[in-house]
Image: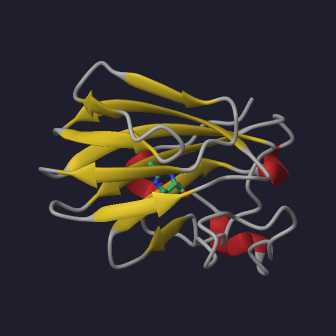
Amino acid sequence: MIIRTLERAEHTARRVVTESWESTRLVLKGDGMGFSFHITTIHPGHEIPMCYRNHLESVFCMEGEGEVETVDDGQVHPIGPGTIYLLDRHDAHILRAHTRMRMACVFNPPLNGKEVHGADGAYPLEAEAVEDESALAS
Ligand code: 9YT
């Protein structure tokens, strides 16, 4: 069994910080679970275009208010606490955070550790893993 806490993981290389979001990746490919699990914060006022062509992602909103737009049909769906959206079709989408949003995200296949969005809004399938596994130690 593996046990970790978010509080400790935030002080390791599991925490990835960008201008518009930050994410602590509590479970990664190296854990052998077949998925990765992240606690992600979206900063207020940001609009993030994404399209995970290499991954399926589910996103459960725990806190905050925002919306997600599916690019193909322009539909806008409000997102708030208790709502989950499932990108089951590698959907191109735009997430807009009206307030600070806290999300629990699951990726299949799992992320290696250091992925950030490319220009196409995707994560590469075989991104660089965290070099020093001890940097992940929670
Ligand atoms: C909601 C979302 O997908 N944000 C981007 C960050 C992602 N969840 C991650 O890499 O942890």
Colouring rule applied to residues = secondary structure
In this picture, residue 30 sits left or right of residue 82: right
Which of 118/129 is in front?
A: 118
In which quadrant is the C terminus drawn?
bottom right
User: Please, is residue 47 above or below residue 117 in the view?
Assistant: above
Residue drawn at (23%, 62%) of the image:
43
Query: Splitting the image into 4 quarters, where does residue 35 fall?
Result: top right
In the rendering, at what x and y percent does residue 46 appear?
A: 24, 65
Q: Give the total number of marks visible in the rendering.
A: 0
In the rendering, at what x and y percent does residue 122 appear?
A: 66, 63
Which of 102/136 is in front?
A: 102
User: Please, is residue 38 above or below residue 35 in the view?
Assistant: below
User: Please, is residue 49 above or below residue 104 in the view?
Assistant: below
Residue extending farthest front: 73
Residue drawn at (77%, 47%) of the image:
110
Query: Splitting the image into 4 quarters, where does residue 81 fall?
Result: top left
In the rendering, at what x and y percent does residue 61 appear?
A: 33, 32
Residue drawn at (46%, 44%) of the image:
5
In this picture, residue 121 sits left or right of residue 49: right
Residue drawn at (61%, 42%) of the image:
91
In the rendering, at what x and y percent does residue 14 appear?
A: 57, 64
In this picture, residue 54 sits left or right of residue 69: right
In this picture, residue 95 sits left or right of residue 2: left
Residue extending farthest left: 99
